[in-house]
Amino acid sequence: MRNLYTKKGKEMEILYKVHNGLYVNLTNRCPCDCTFCLRHTMERVGESESLWLEHEPSFEEVQAAFAHFDMTEYDELVFCGFGEPTEALSVLLKTAEYVKNEWNTPIRLNTNGLGNLINKRDITTELAGLVDTVSISLNTPDKYRYNEIVRSTFGERSFKAMLDFASRCTKCIPKVIMTTVETTITRQEEAECRKICDSIGAVYRIRAWEGGR
């Protein structure tokens, strides 16, 4: 599930609604293959039909997709689809800038926190001023268990890199959230995750497995 998937005969869904947010689906690439990932069991989230992309949309394609949506109806724009948004960093940044300039809508990035490894540089300062909230998948307080759950192509470097990314985000992003998935870890582990978030300066949130992100 790490490669770009193709669904022939279906219109690509770049933008889709979840609750009161408009979500942006930029890529199907992801360095992780999380054991609880929704992509294992479904192809849609929220009001989408299929989040598998025929190709990664250019900024121009993303921009054109906004013509089909009334931005005044949405509380926020969320970069979150069937892939890791920072895999398409250039389009993400251009889209965020476009939305800020046109509507000044609050922007959230849902990420696995491996964007610095993916892009081989610190990208947190590039997100500053464009992204209001970063939500990072913490998943577990244990680095060894993290590798078992997340199954990252970056291997053992991943856990430390994710925590470092979160720490850097707290220096330049207004709100940083770190999440675990309900029922996947124990109450004791959740308490340990809360301590990690407190030490970093992030908000801890336990999210439902069903896809309420």
Image: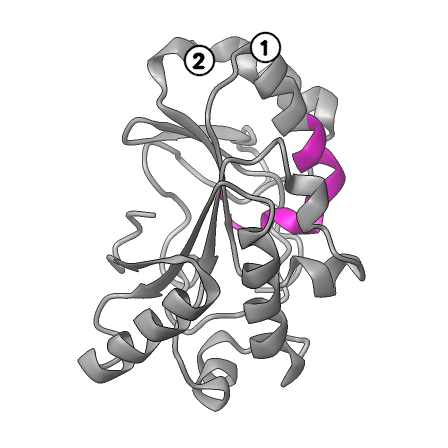
Horizontal side, residue 167 vs residue 69: left or right: right
Q: Above or below — where is 126 with respect to 23?
A: below
Q: Main secondary structure of the magenta part?
A: helix
Q: What residue range appears in magenta?
A: 80-94
Which label was assigned to residue 102?
1
Single out the residue that lies furthest toward the bottom. Answer: 144
Q: Secondary structure at mark 2?
A: helix
Q: Nearer the viewer, mark 1 or mark 2?
A: 1
Q: Above or below — where is 208 with respect to 106?
A: below
Image quadrant in which you'd find residue 205: bottom left
| Residue ID at (61%, 62%) | 165
Label 1: few (<14), some or many (≥20) within 10 Å? few
The location of residue 7, given as percent across then percent down, is: 57, 43
The location of residue 14, given as percent across then percent down, is: 55, 30
Q: Above or below — where is 192 with respect to 203?
A: below
| Residue ID at (56%, 33%) | 9
| Cβ atoms under marks 1 and 2 closer than 8 Å | yes
Q: Secondary structure at mark 1?
A: helix
Which label was assigned to residue 121?
none
Q: Is residue 150 magenta?
A: no
Horizontal side, residue 7 vs residue 146: left or right: right
Please name the residue that numbered disc 2 is placed on.
71
- From the viewer's side, name the closer residue of 197 and 206: 197
